Image (cartoon, helix red, strand yellow):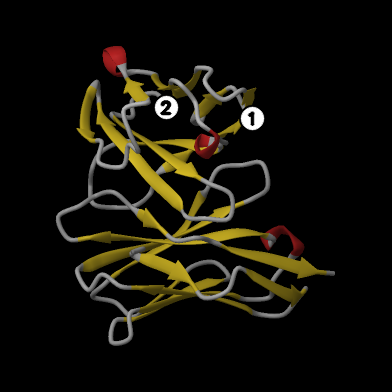
Amino acid sequence: EAGVTQFPSHSVIEKGQTVTLRCDPISGHDNLYWYRRVMGKEIKFLLHFVKESKQDESGMPNNRFLAERTGGTYSTLKVQPAELEDSGVYFCASSLGVTNTGELFFGEGSRLTVL
Amino acid sequence: GESVGLHLPTLSVQEGDNSIINCAYSNSASDYFIWYKQESGKGPQFIIDIRSNMDKRQGQRVTVLLNKTVKHLSLQIAATQPGDSAVYFCADISGGSYIPTFGRGTSLIVHP
């Protein structure tokens, strides 16, 4: 069974440009999460989808970030325009159901470097 | 501030020794705790969890201890192996939520 896949694995862009990260969750997983880790810091929650609906987007830093999950399958996270502080590793995770257990299945992450 | 945090950013041990990774949390409403392991180039992977009505849980070579009095969580790895080298994150979930809140991570380095 395929795990959570993320693309691209690494993206280098200049300040002011746009980047779109993609996440394909495990097939059948209704829950999809985006997290971000800035170097040396905690893995910080960004938002949570249940199917195509945004359940919780309290962690989104500002309106330069836009997440979508059309059709309730894969998700995209767009950063426009990118700033230096957006650099970090963006993790996507999925889970089958919301059961108050913390077993999320993570992808390998998309490393974003903004120059 | 952070809900969870780790005491040390890096822990170095010799192969075969036992490792103890510590974590402090501040939210007294946290009722579920998880440890994740992140190997280089990979995403975090679930290791073990514990609910707040327990103080100890054992897995294969790993034990998680929970002390609610001082809001402290630890992960013990027995007979540490080179393959255990990774960054370890503790995370908590507070009542009514289902979103794990992660700490900063401790890098475990195992020397042969």
Instruction: Indicate which label's residue lies in the foreground, 1 or 2.
Output: 1
User: Picture quarter containing residue B49?
Assistant: bottom left
Going by the image, does A4 lie left or right of A97?
Answer: right
Residue A106 in the image, given as x and y percentages of width and height: 48, 39
| Residue position marked by numbered label 2 in the rendering | A25
Q: Is residue B52 above or below residue A35?
A: below
Going by the image, does B69 lie left or right of A45?
Answer: left
Q: Residue at x 51, y 39 (%)?
A: A85
- Specify whether residue A2 is in view: no
Check whether the beta carbons of the residues at disc 1 and disc 2 lie within 8 A of each other: no
Q: Residue at x 33, y 64 (%)?
A: B3
Residue A89 in the image, given as x and y percentages of width and height: 55, 39
Residue A39 in the image, given as x and y percentages of width and height: 58, 49
- Specify whether residue A105 is in view: yes
Q: Secondary structure at mark 2?
A: loop
Q: Residues within 10 Å of mark 2 (few under 14, many from 20)?
A: many
Q: Residue at x 25, y 41 (%)?
A: A58
Looking at the image, the residue that sits furthest to the bottom is: B69
Which mark, residue B87?
none
Looking at the image, the residue that sits furthest to the right is: B112
Going by the image, does B72 lie left or right of B99?
Answer: right
Looking at the image, the residue that sits furthest to the top is: A71
| Residue position marked by numbered label 1 in the rendering | A115
